[in-house]
Amino acid sequence: MKTFECACIIGVGLLGGSLAKAMRQRRLAKTLVGHGRNRSNLEEAKKLDIIDSFEVDIQSAVKEADLIVLCTPVQAIVPLVRKMAPSLKAGCLVTDVGSVKAQLVREVEPLIPEHAFFVGAHPIAGGEKSGLCVSSKTLFEGTRCIVTPTERTDPDALKQTIDLWEQVGTHVSCMDVEEHDYIFGAVSHLPHVVIYALMNMLGSLKSKNHDEIISFSGAGLKDITRIAGGDPVMWRDICLSNRDSVLHYIDRFQETLNHIRGGIDRGEGEFLVREFETANKHRFHLIENA
Amino acid sequence: MKTFECACIIGVGLLGGSLAKAMRQRRLAKTLVGHGRNRSNLEEAKKLDIIDSFEVDIQSAVKEADLIVLCTPVQAIVPLVRKMAPSLKAGCLVTDVGSVKAQLVREVEPLIPEHAFFVGAHPIAGGEKSGLCVSSKTLFEGTRCIVTPTERTDPDALKQTIDLWEQVGTHVSCMDVEEHDYIFGAVSHLPHVVIYALMNMLGSLKSKNHDEIISFSGAGLKDITRIAGGDPVMWRDICLSNRDSVLHYIDRFQETLNHIRGGIDRGEGEFLVREFETANKHRFHLIENA
């Protein structure tokens, strides 16, 4: 495992802050530099010794780095890479933590100069809370990380990227960007859109005598709406960057829901029991295997 | 608060078992009799001293009771009341824990003889696990319970029902059966149907190289699909007993989802941020107030 001379974390929030802490603990970089839009957040990160220093100018931030990890919302990544590209050091590895990969990797690869490398990555970690204050050096331990090489990816840069994510505790799988977006469109992006829609529909509902019927919710609704607390900008970026998959899955989901709706409408009890038993089985499988 | 001479719990599972335990602890009944379809479950409940005795014949089970609590799936309640009606003792209070009230109360009330009383109730407790083995004397503590009197309800029977649920630790609200079903169709029944549909759509999905893409799920999907583990018979009964409200809400939910779908399709970033911010706000409100 390589020790980086200078690692630059772009966006020192939940993921960037956690990565810096995990790298610090394992001494994966001699120096950690932070960059971000919010100066007081960077000052806080330095005060807490999560980073050694920070730079508000992106070119200054990256110029010494042999590792750069982009931990910003997805749609900020391409403009940042465009800005930093002229300042990248020879041999520098650029990677990211973006939840959507196809469009991103397609746009970033041509921006990286010949003497530097880019490998996309997506650690499956984080939650509905965001920001440095909820970051943790153990965030990635035991989670999965998807690394998405392309035919242009340098084998050594790929190995360094895999090593980095394994060192901070994730189980790394490699897959192509299209398959990544197809899979995460289903298991992550669609569920967020569904829950945002459910929360919005329920949130404004009134009854005859009660202005806020969600106050009657049990534990179930609280559980399922946790992800409705997800960061709006991050989820806008994800929905727009993985638009085709998300639209495809919304349509498929609506078909499945209409299928069950039909059974309720026609009073088909046995059909409903079978559908719900199937869901029980999938749910059991999910918690056993995921 | 009245101490019942003999309370009969019909269906000694999660809710019935928890109620028996809570009543036992607070000495709310001198004798607790259990009834159910599964003899070995009743034997287990007796062995654990949750009930004093059990009867597999419904008429024998209820004949001494001055309190009968129906804790079975919703659609089993009317046939059971029909069977027990000729054996009800004078002054007996019959109540239930069913999640749907309008149709049930409408059908049960005419079956109750003049000398007995019925008051519907719905404690908002329980989870995706069912059965005596997960019952607890503290299940109801701090939860809400909805009691649904009608114009036929005896005031003293209503008071006894409210007292019972307050004694085991719930906060009781009274509302009419229609409003109850309208509210719980939204905050409980619709979310279950949505999650069953989501689980079924995702559960069978494959990608190019992965037969089970749900194995890539993060914590979010595990949280939101917990209720997909709910009992199929219980949820069939709920969907069919509250059919009109459930269909109404499925349609409204589909409209909201289509609204968001349109924003994704047209690439309306600002619209999506506003929608997701609204969901954040409702979610915050839900956990603050519910």
Image (cartoon, coloured by chain):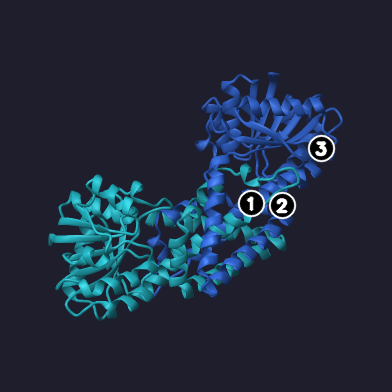
Chain colours: A blue, B cyan
**Dots 2, 1 in contact, CB < 8 A:** yes
Q: Quadrant of the C terminus of chain B?
A: bottom left
- Nearest the viewer among B133 and A128 is B133
For the residues labelled 2 and 3, say whether their Cβ atoms are less than 8 Å apart: no
- Observer able to see residue B194: no
Q: Residue at 72% of width from left, 34% of height from top?
A: A95
Q: Nearer the viewer, residue A264 or A154?
A: A264
Label 1 and label 3: CA atoms lie apart by 23 Å
Looking at the picture, tell me which residue is in the foreground, A67 or A178: A178
Q: At x 76% / y 35%, what residue is drawn?
A: A84
The residue identified by callout 3 is A150
Res A247 quadrant in image: bottom right
Location of residue A279 in the rendering, given as x and y in whole percent from the top left corner: 55, 55
Q: Is residue B210 left or right of residue B65?
A: right
Of labels 2 and 3, earlier in sequence is: 3
Which corner quadrant of the image does residue A73 belong to? top right
Q: Residue B206: x percent and y percent?
A: 70, 49
Q: Which residue in the protein does label 1 denote? A: A189
Q: Tell which circle, 2 or 1, labels the residue nearer the N-terminal end.
A: 1
Q: Is residue B44 visible?
A: yes
Rendered-image quadrant of the N terminus of chain B: bottom left
Q: Which mark is residue A242?
A: 2
Report in which chain the residue with disc 2 lies. Answer: A
- The crowding category of the residue bearing disc 1, from other C-alpha atoms within 10 Å (few below 14, some 14 to 19, many at least 20), is many
Q: Are marks 1 and 3 in contact (CB under 8 Å)?
A: no
Mark 1 / mark 3, whichever is N-terminal: 3
